[in-house]
Image (cartoon, rainbow, N blue to C red):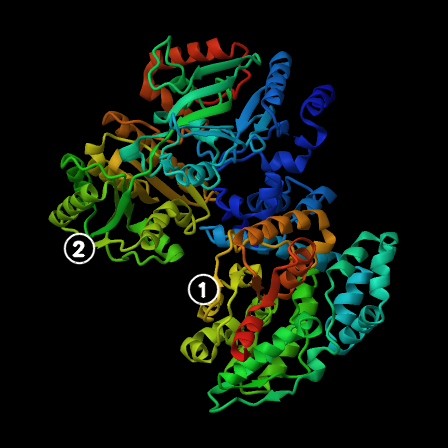
Amino acid sequence: MDYVKLINCMRCGMCLPSCPTYKETFLETASPRGRVALIRKLQEGELDQSERLLEYLSLCLDCQACASACPCGVNAGELVAEFTCERKTDSGLGFMEDLILRKLVPHPDRLETSMVPMRVYQKSGLQTLVRTLGVLKMFPKPLERMEGLLPPLPTRPLRQEIQEVTPAVGTERGTAGFFLGCVMSLIFSDASRATIKLLSSLGYRVITPRNQVCCGAPNMLGGDLEGLKEAAHTNVDIFGGFQVDFIVTDCGGCGAELKKYGHHIEGEAAAAFGSKVRDISQVLALHIEELHAKLKPLQQKVTYHDPCHIAHCQGIRKEPRDLLKLVPGLEYKELEAADACCGSAGTYNITRPEMSDRILQRKLDTVRASGADILVTSNPGCLLQLKKGLADQLPAVKLMHLTEVLALSMSS
Amino acid sequence: MQPSFIKELQTIVGTQYVLIDRESLAVYGYDSTPEIESLPGAVLLPGTTDEVVRIMRLCNEAGITLTPRGSGTNLSGGSLSAGGVVVQTSRLNRLLEIDEENLTATVEPGVITSALHREVEARGLFYPPDPGSMNISTMGGNVAENSGGLRGLKYGVTADYVMGLETVLADGDTLRTGGKVVKDVAGYALNPLLVSSEGTLGFFTGITVKLIPKPQGKITMLAHFPALQDAALAVSAIIAAKVIPATLEFLDKVTIKCVEDYAHVGLPLDVDAVLLIEVDGHPVVIAEEAAAVAEICKKHRCSFFQTAQNPAEALKLTEARRTALSALARLKPTTILEDATVPRSCIAAMLKIIQDAAKKYNVVIGTFGHAGDGNLHPTCLTDERDHDEIKRAHAAFEEIFDAAISMGGTITGEHGVGLAKKKYLPKLVGKSGIKVMRGIKQAFDPKGILNPGKIF
């Protein structure tokens, strides 16, 4: 790791009020400034790579709210992720990590097949039985949490159903390559269906290459830089085979990772790919007036939760709000601390359940205070986390992806 | 630190609130002060006043030193401990009362400054001190350091608002000074003594501050000056014209560029200085004051004068100033920030001295600050790995401090002496000054356990 990146932190403390784990603990070790200092002291030889040090670092959600707050341009979240990656590169992946990150995630077919038992489990009534009997209490905690987080699955993953080319409605204005995120396809297929519908109705021919693979974000998260690079090469090659104006995604996590392909791998093709990537809100915001003409009234109160991967990692805050305010009749209410993490953070809600729950609770409290009927966000991790939170505490509040709200308004 | 002593601390605050692992101690070995680190022996996070009292008694008996710490944004090394106990106030963070009849607020020391702002402003009240770090700085820290801020020119600093204090003394006894009364001449005025005591006289457990009605209106203005000296002269002219803006802030060319790179608020990159000016109060009065300010700036050859059209625009302009320090830090890894302060009529002369010192010692110094109250922040951008440059930077600052003292100014306007300015203090206050301070310290803390080694 570049030492200068570490000493650039001047310890001003501006990051402290933005950090979800610092707000919960008030501990310097759980703060962005503290994490940078820990890594720095490790590099300087003042500290050893102890279990405790790794434990402190692993409390970081990598939400990168600290990066938004840091006036010096230090990204503590990214530095921790980079540190984890470098460490894993040295120590190698564990058996399970290798199984999941190398043998499962990069292969959409296998990933989809792996979900079949879950679908059977839900559809057969077994889930109801298991939940009623509390059988999961007998299994390790993470399994129980994973089960609890999983919403009803669509009958088939979207990737298997969607046509590779969706023609533009009316005059064609351009071509959009659609990057279909794994979780979006497997779990939130309705939202991605809405995304394609919005793009095509605005005159985009939408190409969804069927052989595209996972963006590689899980690999990055798991410290598997090689796996990430492989995924990047594959996707750059695949999308390079089509003439597209944009590469659009409705998954905040994918968008943040795809935009960095130019940094991860060398070559012009990767840089060109990275520069074409857009979050769906960015593309829709280009056609505000046209979209406005198509929208019909929704008489509800809505609020928006900024996914970290969209607000902090991609700097997109205005577009989703502008789009929601566009819907006639829809009353927009700003959420307090809207860009604070919801505690999902990749697999954090499974690996760090206690901290994740505390962070989620703050979010739910603000949602309750907003009085909104609909909570909108646009990242599958947040959708999973908030779905569970709302079901437990605010069942009357409906959770929707940004594109679902717009598509609903369009068709109502 | 003896295991038996640690055990007693654990009994008082609970094991989870006693940090003694190497990693924790390492990250409590710094605050926001550059170049200074010092490892504590233990870090405590008490949750009640009673726990503070018991910790203090224990430390005093054992002869172990105790250093209070808020969020660790101190800029003079005041929250660092060499082998002693650091007591972090974060869990003592209750807002105890807002008394609308007496216009006071009472808080525990760990309350975040901007959280108090939010609460009182929601009731149409106002707590003016707004240090640059107010989004994370604590009230306890603000009182201990007598923090200033952007609004100091018109509204004064923390000391001007502290009405009452509850302080745990070194022997564990509790001292109550002042209260909610506006007038109080009973005995020595101890509040002002405790404010800015930098943790060397006691540990605050309760703070009562004065509130004032929230100003009805505010006009935010920005003026661009092609020549640095014109900006400085405009500052003196505004004050001389009997207009007291709430904020009268100065940014030089180096600072403007950094802030603009970071905040993108449309600051000009081709001028030598900008002034950020805010007048607040009754709408009719501030309209007149704003007109007077505009007139003076134009007379002093400002090339552009901008008035924020709405609160959002105004907020953006003031936020830009607020990030000045950190934005400067983007240029180089190490930032040495000073706060030498001079009588405000000397601002122009002081700016010249800073520029000359930077040139003489061949270092980059960006200057911004509270020009209206004579408190400038010359900030040296350097690299801690370049020992020669660091040496030259300190030499430049030594000249700047000497000049400030000779103009009737001071070596620190709002950051405190702590460890960083210790060696300059005798020059300012002389032998008798140090002697009196030592005497006071002796009276409060005979065994010298409270934040030793700071100030003198």
| Quadrant of the image containing the N terminus of chain A | bottom right
- Chain of the residue under the numbered disc 1 shown in the image: A
Q: Amino acid at mark 1?
A: Lys
Q: Is residue B186 above or below residue B340?
A: above
Q: Is residue A397 above or below residue A165?
A: above
Q: State the residue in front, B368 or B265.
A: B265
Mark 1 surroundings: few (<14), some (14-19) or many (≥20) residues within 10 A: few
- Chain of the residue under the numbered disc 2 shown in the image: B
Q: State the residue in front, B54 or B302.
A: B54
On the image, the x and y values in percent for residue A229 come to 65, 70
| Quadrant of the image containing the C terminus of chain A | bottom right
Secondary element at tag 1: helix
Secondary element at tag 2: loop
Where does label 2 land, which residue?
Answer: B303
Tell me which residue sits at (68%, 70%) in the image. A183
Tell me which residue sits at (27%, 48%) in the image. B220
Give the left or right position of residue A254, taking residue B373 as reference. right
Mark 2 surroundings: few (<14), some (14-19) or many (≥20) residues within 10 A: few
Tell me which residue sits at (52%, 78%) in the image. A410
Q: Amino acid at mark 2?
A: Ser
Question: Contact (CB < 8 A) between labels 1 and 2?
Answer: no
Confirm whether residue A43 shows in the render: yes
Give the left or right position of residue A199, taking residue B351 as reference. right
Where does label 1 land, which residue?
Answer: A318
On the image, the x and y values in percent for residue B133 come to 43, 40
On the image, the x and y values in percent for residue B248 come to 26, 41
Marks 1 and 2 belong to one chain = no
1 vs 2, front mark: 1
Confirm whether residue B417 shows in the render: no
Residue reaching furthest to the front: A299
